[in-house]
Image: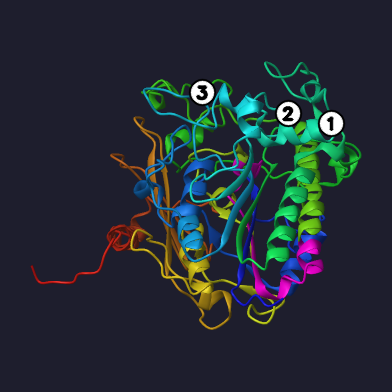
């Protein structure tokens, strides 16, 4: 290839626990992601800016924290006037594309806030046949919104199913779009029509087009799994034996020193009404008690969803190689947030900033640039993706972006680019407004207008079972970390332009 400007291939999963890689966990198979890690660098301490989809995904493309770009929670919208990294790539002559899940907008329109990802337009296939962008800086998009058989299926994925002969695709999805309420663990849709295949096929088609025209590209292949519901087509649904899997659980009394909403998750009928002042529920504010046998089956399917996704990630990586683009392409794999499947007695996600939820898998590969087969403890956050991608490609970073450039760390030229990360979690107006500060050893979580909080020594207590917040012997450390959180907040203020005059 005559092309010299590097390509960026971002591959993401959805709600994937950081430990669900075969190279870290012998109970799961992910041969293609393992191969990517062998050829590049696996970062063990990568964090999300928010443990839910919309805020983190908006941070990926803006290089800003949720409190800065405005899409601070699920059910909010990233406003179209916010600057995104795709605009910088387009201005630099790159092709920009997103295939799969966007989730920058809510499922419902309200109070004048429009949404292309909402009912009824998401199921207006005539609209989507004529729309491929631009969308948040991506000149070309092919979108879907459902997780497995969720009712809100449509957009380009539904069109692809029809074009490939699945005229009765509605039979495999829940009402009101479909008519199948019976699916549990085994998704009846044939694998050939699974959205993993759609994402791989369409991503490969775009890469082929770019290679033919010798165009540099920024491409985001955005997978939906292993986000629940726990459903996967056969034969994957029986790939893992539930009896052979480890089922994490809470230790007796481990929530005794935690904030009250942690303790309430371990009750049969908890009253979370004080946390619902706005009338909107909050993910995770419910009972998390579970049957161990049922959880084992869910884990088996969750792992199977991950392994199936890994298969199609391999299809994309193989195509990149076949096109002769691998040497000149930085590939980064990560997830938008983590997942609980029994850890600390918790399920799925919520305002619980354990490592299981806010840490994610994170692999970077660029042949000849990233150290092969390396593992790094350098702190990473997904806020840093946009400015780092731009740096790799020699494109100036706009002043709106508050993430830092990690490219020297990715290429083994620096040990670290930051000494802390910040994780935000806000549901407004409710009593959940959380900020977490993490450095090399400690984690501090502060709740807005609350006296309770969390302080963990991740070195001495990596499983986070001993909350030191109220321990008087740690009061000086707590005060220091609160000050460091304040400094971190001040340090992430954007500078839209340099100072050019004294007045």
Of 2 and 97, nearer the camera is 2
Q: What secondary structure is found at the residue carrying circle 2?
A: loop
Pointers 2 and 1 in contact (CB under 8 A)? yes
Q: Secondary structure at mark 3?
A: loop
Give the number of the mark in front: 3 or 1.
Answer: 1
Q: Which residue is mark 2?
A: 149
Query: Which callout, 2 or 1, points at the residue further toward the start of the chain?
Result: 2
Give me the C-alpha separation between circle 3 and circle 2: 29 Å
Magenta segment includes 342: yes
The label on residue 189 is 1
> Label 3: few (<14), some or many (≥20) within 10 Å?
some
Alpha carbon distance from label 3 to label 1: 37 Å
Q: Secondary structure at mark 1?
A: loop
Q: Is residue 20 magenta?
A: no
At 41% from the left and 42% from the top, the residue drawn is 80
3 or 1: tag closer to the N-terminus: 1
Work out whether mark 3 precedes mark 2 in sequence or the reverse, and give the earlier one. Answer: 2
- Counting from the top left corner in percent of width and height, residue 300 is at 80, 41
> Magenta segment range?
317-344
Q: Position of residue 283 (x, y in %)?
A: 52, 32
Of all residues shown, which one is farthest toward the front? 213
Which residue is nearer to you in this view: 9 or 234?
Answer: 9
Judge by depth and name the residue closer to the eye, 19 or 314: 314
Residue 488 sits in which quadrant?
bottom left
In the rendering, at what x and y percent does residue 230 appear?
74, 34
Q: Which residue is mark 3?
A: 270
């Amino acid at each position: 290839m005559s092309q010299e400007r590097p390509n960026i291939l971002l591959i993401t999963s959805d709600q994937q626990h950081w430990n669900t890689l075969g190279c870290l966990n012998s109970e799961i198979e992910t041969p293609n992601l393992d191969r990517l890690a062998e050829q590049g660098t696996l970062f063990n301490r990568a964090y999300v800016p928010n443990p839910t989809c919309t805020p983190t995904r908006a941070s990926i493309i803006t290089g800003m924290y949720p409190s800065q770009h405005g899409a601070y929670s699920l059910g909010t919208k990233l406003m179209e006037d916010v600057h995104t990294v795709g605009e910088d790539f387009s201005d630099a002559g790159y092709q920009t594309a997103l295939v799969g899940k966007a989730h920058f907008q809510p499922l419902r329109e309200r109070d004048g806030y429009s949404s292309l990802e909402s009912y009824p337009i998401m199921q207006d296939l005539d609209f989507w046949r004529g729309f491929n962008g631009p969308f948040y800086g991506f000149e070309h998009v092919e979108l879907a919104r459902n997780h497995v058989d969720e009712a809100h299926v449509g957009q380009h994925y539904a069109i692809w199913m029809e074009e490939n002969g699945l005229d009765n695709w509605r039979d495999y999805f829940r009402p009101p779009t479909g008519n199948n309420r019976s699916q549990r663990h085994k998704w009846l849709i044939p694998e050939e029509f699974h959205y993993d295949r759609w994402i791989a096929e369409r991503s490969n088609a775009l890469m082929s087009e770019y290679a033919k025209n010798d165009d540099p590209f920024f491409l985001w292949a955005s997978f939906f799994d292993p986000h629940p519901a726990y459903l996967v087509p056969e034969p994957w649904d029986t790939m893992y034996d539930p009896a052979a899997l480890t089922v994490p659980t809470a230790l007796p009394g481990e929530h005794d020193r935690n904030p009250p909403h942690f303790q309430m998750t371990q009750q049969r009928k908890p009253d979370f009404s004080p946390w619902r002042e706005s009338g909107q529920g909050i993910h995770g504010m419910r009972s998390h008690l579970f049957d161990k046998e049922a959880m084992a089956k869910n884990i088996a399917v969750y792992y199977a969803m991950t392994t199936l996704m890994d298969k199609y990630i391999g299809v994309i990586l193989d195509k990149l190689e076949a096109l002769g683009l691998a040497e000149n392409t930085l590939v980064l794999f990560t997830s938008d947030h983590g997942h609980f499947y029994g850890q600390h007695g918790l399920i799925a996600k919520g305002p619980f900033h354990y490592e299981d939820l806010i840490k994610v898998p994170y692999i970077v590969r660029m042949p000849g640039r990233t150290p092969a087969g390396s593992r790094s403890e350098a702190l990473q956050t997904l806020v840093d993706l946009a400015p780092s991608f731009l740096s790799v490609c020699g494109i100036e970073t706009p002043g709106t972006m508050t993430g830092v450039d990690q490219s020297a760390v990715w290429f083994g030229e620096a040990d670290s680019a930051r000494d802390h990360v910040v994780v935000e979690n806000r549901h407004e107006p409710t009593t959940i407004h959380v900020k977490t500060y993490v450095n090399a050893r400690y984690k501090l979580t502060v709740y807005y207008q609350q006296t309770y909080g969390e302080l963990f020594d991740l070195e001495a207590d990596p499983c986070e079972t001993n909350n030191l917040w109220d321990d008087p012997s740690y009061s000086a450390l707590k005060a220091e970390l609160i000050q460091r959180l304040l400094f971190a907040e001040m340090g992430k203020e954007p500078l839209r332009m340099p100072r050019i005059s004294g007045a």
